[in-house]
Amino acid sequence: GAVVSQHPSWVICKSGTSVKIECRSLDFQATTMFWYRQFPKQSLMLMATSNEGSKATYEQGVEKDKFLINHASLTLSTLTVTSAHPEDSSFYICSARTSADRGGELFFGEGSRLTVL
Amino acid sequence: GDSVTQMEGPVTLSEEAFLTINCTYTATGYPSLFWYVQYPGEGLQLLLKATKADDKGSNKGFEATYRKETTSFHLEKGSVQVSDSAVYFCALSGRGLTGGGNKLTFGTGTQLKVEL
């Protein structure tokens, strides 16, 4: 199956700093990627839909200036958590969609755990 | 809005036991339904799916039937193995055939532990 990779898999940062998380589709091109956030014992919550070459679409309640998403190429989307605070500590997961001729299915990265001190 | 409710875990079973993980949903229209599995240290993987009422998705010995009358999509396996230990997520996608072009709404996940 298709492979999606996230980097870093875990990161610890100080409050007030910014952290960038990368999501790459390794063996296919993805015009659409999705970013999720997962709190312990809770479901994955969709944060935003990342579209290659255009602005991301954010879900209600997600601060676009706080969570900057860039989908600069067909294989890379980045999520930058700006001025991170302890409440931003969470597990961030991306997914990428294959093209219609490959079934249009979603493949997920392994997740990135952010801890803000 | 759409929502998915699945049983809380962890579920601990002995090898070769029968598994059921309950999942019910609330959605408008005719959603597609999915089960994803997350093995330790890995990303979510699609386990099986069903796109319309009475469809049965199956894979690796797991099965789930799309029951519109009870709005359920319970996951079952007749004989679990230690290697099935993972977190299982039920999810739905509104009106999409593959779930790829539409947002997925997830349940909270159910951890399964299978012991020898």
Image: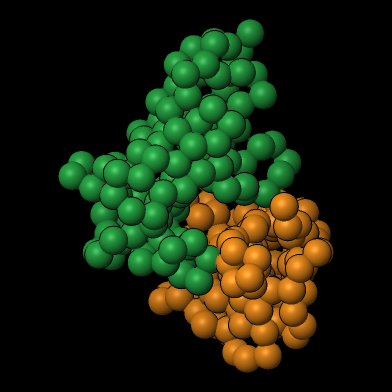
Q: Which chain is green?
A: B
Q: Is residue B113 above or below residue A12?
A: above
Q: Which chain is orange?
A: A
Number of marks = 0
Residue furthest out toward the front: A101
List x then y, in percent, for residue B1: 28, 65
Q: Is residue A94 above or below residue A49?
A: above
In the rendered structure, the answer to whether residue A34 lies left or right of residue A76 reads left
Identify the residue at horizontal 46%, vertical 48% (top origin): B49
Can you see residue A6?
no
Identify the residue at horizontal 50%, vertical 55% (top origin): A44
Front-most of A42 and A95? A95
In the rendered structure, the answer to whether residue B43 lies left or right of residue A28 reads left
Identify the residue at horizontal 66%, vertical 37% (top origin): B39
Residue furthest out toward the bottom: A54
Front-most of B61 and B85? B61
Q: Is residue B33 above or below residue B97?
A: above
List x then y, in percent, for residue A9: 77, 54
Front-most of A15 and B77? B77
